[in-house]
Amino acid sequence: MFQVEVIMDLSSVVIQTTPFEGQKPGTSGLRKKVKVFMEKNYTENFIQCILNALGSKLQGCTLVVGGDGRYFTKQAINIIIRIAAANEVAKLIIGHLGIFSTPAVSSLIRTHKVLGGIVLTASHNPGGIRNDFGIKVNIDNGGPAPDSVTDAIYEETKKIKEYKFTPKLETDRLIDNMGTHTYKVDGRDFVVEIIDPTTDYVNLMKQIFDFQKLRDLIRGTDKRPPFNVLIDSMNGVTGVYVRKIFVEELGAHPDNNVTRIVPLDNFGEIHPDPNLTYAKDLVDKVKDNPTYDFGAAFDGDGDRNMIIGKNAFFVTPSDSLAVLANNLECIPYFKNHGIHGFARSMPTAAAVDRVAKKLGMEMFEVPTGWKYFGNLMDAGRLSLCGEESFGTGSDHIREKDGIWAVLAWLSVIEHKKMSVEEILKEHWSIYGRNYFTRYDYEECDSDAANQMMTHLEKLIASSDFVGKTYTASKKSYTIEKADNFSYVDPIDKSVAKNQGIRILFSDGSRLIYRLSGTGSSGATIRLYIDSYEKENVFTDAQVRNCH
Ligand SMILES: O=P([O-])(O)O[C@H]1O[C@H](COP(=O)(O)O)[C@@H](O)[C@H](O)[C@H]1O
Ligand SMILES: [Mg+2]
């Protein structure tokens, strides 16, 4: 660590620009192909619009900046530094080499009590020069910006005429070394602090979990053999955190217990998305080696997770949420902070609702997007939430958190002294099972996808739709209700409309159609099937839901 005092007084300049079409943030920030972000002024415009949308809070503020290290991260950071300096931002806290996982940004914003952050990621979308980049804004609670903020940014992008820039501020290799750099820009102090991306986050995890118990689980003790894990970072940002937490703190073996833990700017040409399709490598390794008791994978920016047990026994994200909800006493954090309610996104299977009911907890159903959980957490009404899209998290931060989810699962396993499969089977025999499947239709024509949604909307509005009965595999399903999901935030009363077509059946089963908000081109249609069984709980979900 070092301090650099740059005495020279730098001046900012104003550069003329014109708006770009389509700079509308999606579910989780602006995601486009790298080559789009590389167009002259494209990234500069968007950054200036973010700062414009911050309004009077901008002057003298501190922002956290970093991301999953994908291609174009360094170039984007250099642009952010020069634009922030010219716009009277007082300080940027940036991860060494530009690296911060999304959960780490959320944590840093909270621990440093700063105005917000700029997260450079396209999450699970492939990286590299031919693939995706993304820019996302987080607000002062550490969470993704709500619609009101992203709408304001979008409005700015439609009318931008100029951006401010500090051309002589030398950014070359700035993020390669940790330390504090102080500049004079237009007579004001401007500070860039480059920090270790792991320190704050590792400390947070140590406060939440019992690291000694987790170490005993992984290393084994006189009384129990080592619990053999395989943690797969999929060449994404979690690699640096996995090395610190699993290898250095918890004693996992660097060759046998962790894999793909060096972040690569193209994720090694894979799709860094932890699911059965894209994390097949992990699934195969755990299947082929019966000594593995557990496997987990994360996405590019570290907020998603997938959990599998011995023989690659798969835990759906919806079940993962329900199991954790049922076992929070295994995690020290919740003993200290209490448990204040659960939530899930609308398409997520309703397994957690049953746990909430049994425990007498408040339960919320929100639109897809982690940003919808923030207000409830800030109001002290939500402790644990999750999404079918491989997101699980708690009110320790305001993002979903992949590493947290794995440590939570290991805490439950340590406490219950049961395997992943045993835990799931016990859960289903108590609560019944929500069989869940999702089908994705990617890169569809956008107009055609929109027409399909319009058609569905008309269909569910027809007078004889509700009450219709369908029979499949000797079971009858009667439509009880159908709508296009809309949500009124219980805290600030903001309204989110058109969040997906829901067809709800009288036994609690559901069919949901929605357009994804995270792609970078074309449309992705998602079809979700959630079907509840009280008794028949041990069938394959694909088989069950295809009937
Ligand atoms: O991409 P991430 O990991 O930030 O995940 C993002 O998108 C997911 C949905 O994606 P889609 O709109 O494609 O269904 C959301 O569930 C999640 O809260 C959001 O952060
Ligand atoms: Mg992600």
Image (cartoon, grey):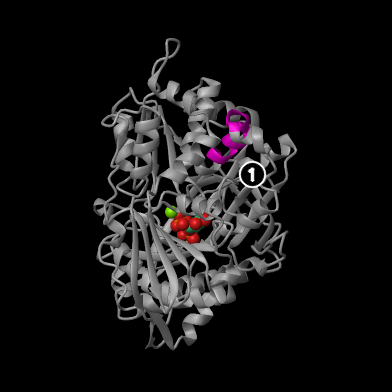
Q: Nearer the viewer, residue 80 or 481?
A: 80
The residue segment tinted magenta is: 319-332
Position of 370 compared to 136: left or right?
right
Whether residue 55 can be seen here = yes
Q: Nearer the viewer, residue 253 or 300?
A: 253
Please count the marks in the image: 1
Q: Quadrant of residue 440?
A: bottom left
Label 1 CB sits under 8 Å from any ligand 1 atom: no
Whether residue 534 can be seen here = no
Estimate the x, y position of residue 220 in percent, counting from the top left: 40, 18
Estimate the x, y position of residue 180 in percent, counting from the top left: 37, 58
Position of 358 compared to 317: left or right?
right
Q: Nearer the viewer, residue 193 or 519?
A: 193
> In the displayed image of the protein, which residue is found farthest to the front?
7
- Give the labeled residue for mark 1: 383
Q: From what the image shows, is residue 353 above or below residue 221?
A: below
Which residue is drawn at the image coordinates 66% and 53% (left, top)?
A: 378
Estimate the x, y position of residue 302 in percent, counting from the top left: 41, 49
